[in-house]
Amino acid sequence: MLPRLKGAFGETKAAKYLRKNKYEIIASGYYSRFGEIDLIAKKGNTVVFIEVKTRKDASFAKAFEFVDRNKIQKIKKTAQLWMTQNDKDYNYRFDVIEIYTENDTLNHIENAF
């Protein structure tokens, strides 16, 4: 599967999972000059910034291990920009959703960083 298609597949699957679990999707592919956030969702009074990692399997490494320090900084800067543009009284959280295509599994890691 091509990387772009694999990413889109994972983000679609993650969004479906989040909706099923009572999250409201606020944005998908939110871009800023600092970087991108795959999904922004809201549940109750919490806004969740979500990085989706799609891999064939975990034989080399778990998908969340590909969210390195540089990626975390970009996500946090982009989230700060979103927060200033959407000034509301929310709690905030950063999650990672791992998608493994070989066995069609999803792992939601809350408060990942």
Image (tube, helix red, strand yellow):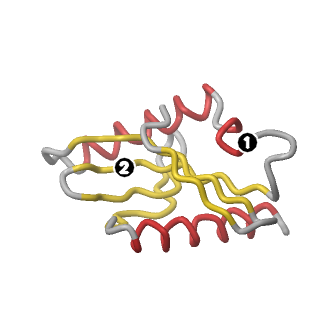
Q: Residue at x 73, y 42 (%)?
A: 62
Q: Quadrant of residue 60?
A: top right
Q: Which residue is mark 1?
A: 62
Secondary structure beneath dot 1 equals loop
**CB atoms at circles 2 and 1 under 8 Å apart?**
no
Q: Residue at x 70, y 38 (%)?
A: 66
- Answer left or right for 21 relative to 89: right
Horizontal and vertical percent position of residue 90 = 19, 45
Q: Residue at x 34, y 36 (%)?
A: 80
In the displayed orientation, state which residue is furthest to the top. 69
Could you tell me the amino acid type at mark 1? Lys
Q: Which residue is mark 2?
A: 48
Horizontal and vertical percent position of residue 61 = 79, 39
The mark that comes first in sequence, 2 or 1, is 2
Instruction: Pick the residue in front: 29 or 103.
Output: 103
Instruction: Pick the residue in front: 91 or 107.
Output: 107
Horizontal and vertical percent position of residue 11 = 58, 65
Q: In the image, is residue 54 above or below residue 85?
A: below
